[in-house]
Amino acid sequence: MKFSSLYAFLVLCCICSPLFPSIAQSQVVADTPIWRSSINTQSRQIIISGQEDNFTLSLCILSEKPSLLRISFVPNNKIKNITFVNFTIGKQIFTLTKQLNQNNVIEFEVTLSTSQLKTFIHDFTSTEKATITIDHKEIPISLIGTSSLVATLLERLNTHPIPKLAPPFGKTSSENLPSLSNTNNKTTSYSQLLYGMGGIFFLLLFGRPLFKLLSRIHRYRKKSYGVKKAYKIASNEIEQHAKTLYIKRDQLLYKDDYGSLVQEKWIQEANRFLRTKIKPLLSENQVLDYYPLIQNKILKKVLYIAKYPPNKQRAFFTNRKKTKLKYSPTMPPLEYEEYCAELLRQAGWNADVTTASGDQGADIIASKKKITLIIQCKLYSKPVSNKAVQEVNAAKIFYHAHYAAVVSNANYTTSARQLASSTKVTLLHHENLQKFANTLV
């Protein structure tokens, strides 16, 4: 029933559209990867906006009103107490003051005079970047592509002018505005009538299936955006409490009398963290409905990050740059560990080096497709003893890993080989590490 009503409404709008040529909608004129310009002839305004990850910068040019420069931020703790920000473009510095929050967005605004607007547009199209200064911290914003964007906008205004806009977007006098003759008006009305009739036939044939398709696409995009936003909010909160989570895990994990690791209390604490910190935060940002879709993913992140001490947790918050280490018998032991980790990364594993003094006998913790591999590295000039096998086997038990291996440039003693055979620890030369890792998944 609801589809039939909407279908009838669309047909009626299409029939009436040629009868009301004055009705206009906001239309995008030009865009770049960052910037976009649009015109709304009904409200007689132009909007030029640029979007980054955490903020949107907008220039609103209104007919018979001062232009407005606005910066809208996604709410975060860093700018909650900030009362103003500075926007620098060319030699101009604008101070934008904080406005009342609307729709959970923090906004800063300033009005521009006609002369300021002309200079602003000149710098906007002739420089490559501008900066936003927040509490003495500068955030760059690229202006590449703005020249062609404004040129396209001016071309559009030459053919479809908006009266009484400030220069360079408006005419200096109403006499310069083009006038339409009666003949042109008749031709325009006739063209609109033909377009309206064509639209009616199109809607009769394809209106309902097209509406269903667009609705499905809209729902999918809305869901995808909501899931990404919810995960980003949850991820940031986890990172802020990473140190506390590491301490809690260390306090709540213990081994029973049989040597088995008991982690029920730690799992309960992790779930309590999600329930008391993450869910209220998602509710505050109106994305709580997406929590069931990301629950397992963020719980896995909590459990994974909490395994590592604070001085190593930063490795999980930033993208690791690929190293280009080359093996050398004289390289430092720590570089040898990083070299072995890089070999695993090249084989498609997520591999991270632990602290310099080792972490429960593990030098490298690697994972791929839910498989965990513990590595101890030994850069020796003599055969490796069974002590390395004992340590990496203990680390395997501690981390609940699936496999453990000792990697060295040297040979292994007979006792080390015997112990490795009984504990199922693999003894490798680093040249065989990638081949071994590929056999595990």
Image (cartoon, grey):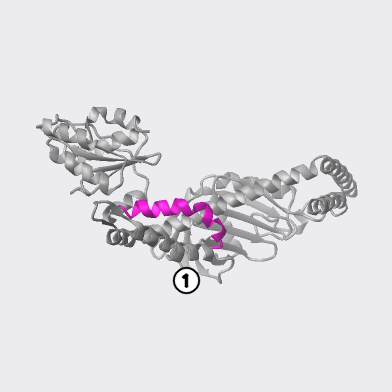
- Kindly identify the residue that appears in the image at 41 percent across and 63 percent down: 273
- Above-or-below relation of 416 to 305: above
Q: Residues within 10 Å of mark 1 (few under 14, many from 20)?
A: some
Quadrant in the rendering for residue 252: bottom left
Is 302 covered by the magenta stretch?
yes
Q: On the rendered structure, is 216 left or right of 414? A: right
- Kindly identify the residue that appears in the image at 82 percent across and 43 percent down: 203
**Does residue 147 show up?**
yes
Chain part drawn in magenta: 285-307
Residue, disc 1: 83
- Above-or-below relation of 262 to 202: below
**Does residue 53 show up?**
no
Is 381 covered by the magenta stretch?
no
Q: Residue furthest left?
A: 382
Where residue 63 appears, x then y in whole percent? 70, 62
Where residue 243 appears, x then y in whole percent? 31, 60
Where residue 321 appears, x then y in whole percent? 34, 41
* Of 390 and 314, the residue lying toward us: 390
- Kindly identify the residue that appears in the image at 74 percent across and 50 percent down: 160
- Above-or-below relation of 185 to 376: below
Q: How many marks?
A: 1
Our reading of the magenta stretch's main secondary structure is helix
Where residue 116 appears, x then y in whole percent? 56, 61
Given the image, on which type of amino acid does mark 1 rest? Answer: Thr
Q: In the structure shown, which secondary structural element does the residue marked by tag 1 occupy?
A: loop
